[in-house]
Amino acid sequence: MALPDFQLLRPRTVAEAIELLAKHAASAQIVAGGTDLIPSMGQHLFAPRFLVDIRGIGELRGIRERDGGLEIGALTTLTTIERSLEIARGYPVLHEAAKTVASPLLRNMGTIGGNICLDTRCLWYNQSRQWRKSCGFCIKSPRRANIGLAGDPDEKDGDLCHVAPGGAKCWAAFSGDTPPALLCLEADIEIAGPRGTRRVPLSGFYTNVGDARMKLEKNELLTRVLLPAKTAGWRGVYRKLRIRGSIDYPLAGVAIALKCSNGHVADAKVAITAVNPAPLIVKDATEALAGREVNQELALHIGELAARMAKPLTTSALSPEYRREMIRVFTKRAVLEAAR
């Protein structure tokens, strides 16, 4: 688990970080909290020649009001989000999701930006190099040209997905907790790059492909999360399946946000995580809930819609069938709880 050699670069501004990323794009990676990247480097999943440590960029921290909603800096820790009264009162589904991430120690280090950009995971990939080599690697195996492994005889590009051998797509699962909550809140993100900044909906950020999970160039940096005024005050619930009560990534997760009026659902969003290569909105659920009074039958129907969208494969320790069933069960429970 020894780390590969690397040079640490510490920019103090966003502009300086973008300049360093542009200069070393082919062999650099961003580190913030490091709770996912550093263990992966220990497994030699990544061996960047340069680590761009952005923790010194103060402008990327904090929670501020903006246009009636909230702006969250990408370096804001998950603990800060968990303890924020503004988020707990205005965007409870995000509060619920943040407080379930890993353990208190990891939430103290982990950031909202890192959770959004979390790498996808798979039993066949997140292993030691010796284990990966014995299996013949996979589609998601490290690309030598991109991470500085050109002189390493043990690594090679794989061409097989072990969980779906007949296909050419990587099915490694996205396992972030906060992104499904943010999808329910219709959040946007701000991305900085050499050509300036751009604001994009989080729903368009993910690709649903395990080995190329997000639309972020090597010379770009996620800087802010923007929560709209529209979804402020919506009721929210997040539920996750994991083997242990803390530390573990979700093996299935459901987020729901509801706006109710006179006992009926005025608007709603349901999203799932950890059962596909991306967090996904259950689009049919919004239409099915709109204008309805929530009852057991409706909640069960929403659970069926979520389970139908879930595509779990053998990427984790639990069976795909069980994870899909728990998506159905958790969604039903979350809908009933949010309606109450």
Image: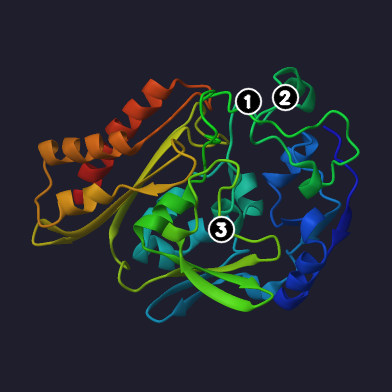
* Label 2 secondary element: helix
- Ranked by sequence position, the earlier of labels 1 and 2 is 1
- Ranked by sequence position, the earlier of labels 3 and 2 is 2
Q: Nearer the viewer, residue 95 or 154?
A: 154
Q: What kind of colouring is applied to the model shown? A: rainbow
Q: Quadrant of residue 119?
A: top right
* Amino acid of disc 1: Trp
Labels 1 & 2 near each other (Cβ < 8 A):
yes
Q: Quadrant of residue 259?
A: bottom left
**Residue with the mark numbered 1:** 124
Q: Quadrant of residue 121?
A: top right
CA distance for labels 1 and 3: 24 Å
Residue at 87 percent across and 41 percent down: it is: 150
* Amino acid of disc 3: Lys
**Residue with the mark numbered 3:** 215
Image position of 305 (left or right of 289): right
Q: Is residue 266 above or below residue 58?
A: above
* Label 3 secondary element: loop
Residue at 55 percent across and 60 percent down: it is: 80
For disc 1, the neighbor class at 10 Å (few under 14, some 14 to 19, many from 20) is: many
* Residue closest to the far top: 134
**Residue with the mark numbered 2:** 132
Whether residue 90 is visible:
yes
> How far from the left and from the top, in percent, is residue 21?
76, 65
> How far from the left and from the top, in percent, is residue 27?
81, 54
Q: Nearer the viewer, residue 278 or 274?
A: 278
> How far from the left and from the top, in percent, is residue 85?
43, 65
Image position of 280 (left or right of 301): right
